[in-house]
Amino acid sequence: MFSPTDCFCQNPEVVYRDVDEWKSGLAFEPDRPCLYMLNPTAMLMWELCRDGRRLDAIEQQYCELLGNRLGPEAARAQLHRGLTDMIASGLVTRTADREGRT
């Protein structure tokens, strides 16, 4: 379970490329090594983690973009599942907010 003040950041070792013709993205995690194909929803989650944002800020933006289609609770649950998968895959890191970033 996440805390609203947890921060999420893209793993700087991951090499990421958009694949426009497939409407997806490719992320290579060299420590494993693994190649992941990100669908448009996962691409959005990846983008929202680009600068170490807090979960509450990520949730707000994610729900603004997808909440009308999914409903806010379903969008939040989808985001949490995606972040959990990205952490397990090594694409994203999670840290406690120590600097008051938003």
Image: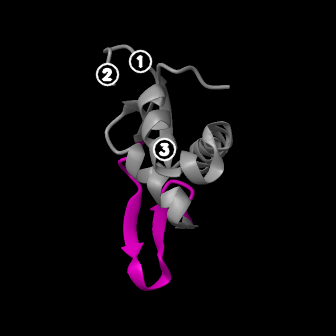
Tell me which residue sits at (39%, 52%) in the image.
47
SS class, disc 3? helix
Of circles 2 and 3, which is in front?
A: 3
SS class, disc 2? loop
* Mark 1 / mark 3, whichever is N-terminal: 3
Q: Tell me the number on the disc at residue 8.
A: none
Q: Position of residue 102 (x, y in %)?
A: 33, 25
Tell me which residue sits at (58%, 43%) in the image.
83
How many residues crowd mark 3 within 10 Å: few (<14), some (14–19), many (20+)?
many
Left-right relation of 101 to 66? left
Quarter of the image for residue 19 reads bottom left
Q: Circle 1 sits on which residue?
A: 97
Callout 1 amino acid: Asp
Q: CA–CA distance between discs 1 and 3?
A: 19 Å
Callout 2 amino acid: Arg
Q: Nearer the viewer, residue 18 or 32?
A: 18
* Contact check, label 2 and label 3, Cβ < 8 Å: no
Callout 3 amino acid: Tyr
Residue 51 falls inside the magenta stretch: no
Q: CA–CA distance between discs 2 and 3?
A: 18 Å
Q: CA–CA distance between discs 2 and 1?
A: 7 Å
* Extent of the magenta region: 10-34
How many residues crowd mark 2 within 10 Å: few (<14), some (14–19), many (20+)?
few
Of circles 1 and 3, which is in front?
A: 3
Q: Circle 3 sits on which residue?
A: 62
Q: Circle 2 sits on which residue?
A: 101
Q: Position of residue 90 (x, y in %)?
A: 54, 47
How many residues crowd mark 1 within 10 Å: few (<14), some (14–19), many (20+)?
some
Left-right relation of 102 to 31? left
* Contact check, label 2 and label 1, Cβ < 8 Å: yes
* Quadrant in which the N terminus is drawn: top right
Q: Residue furthest bottom?
A: 21
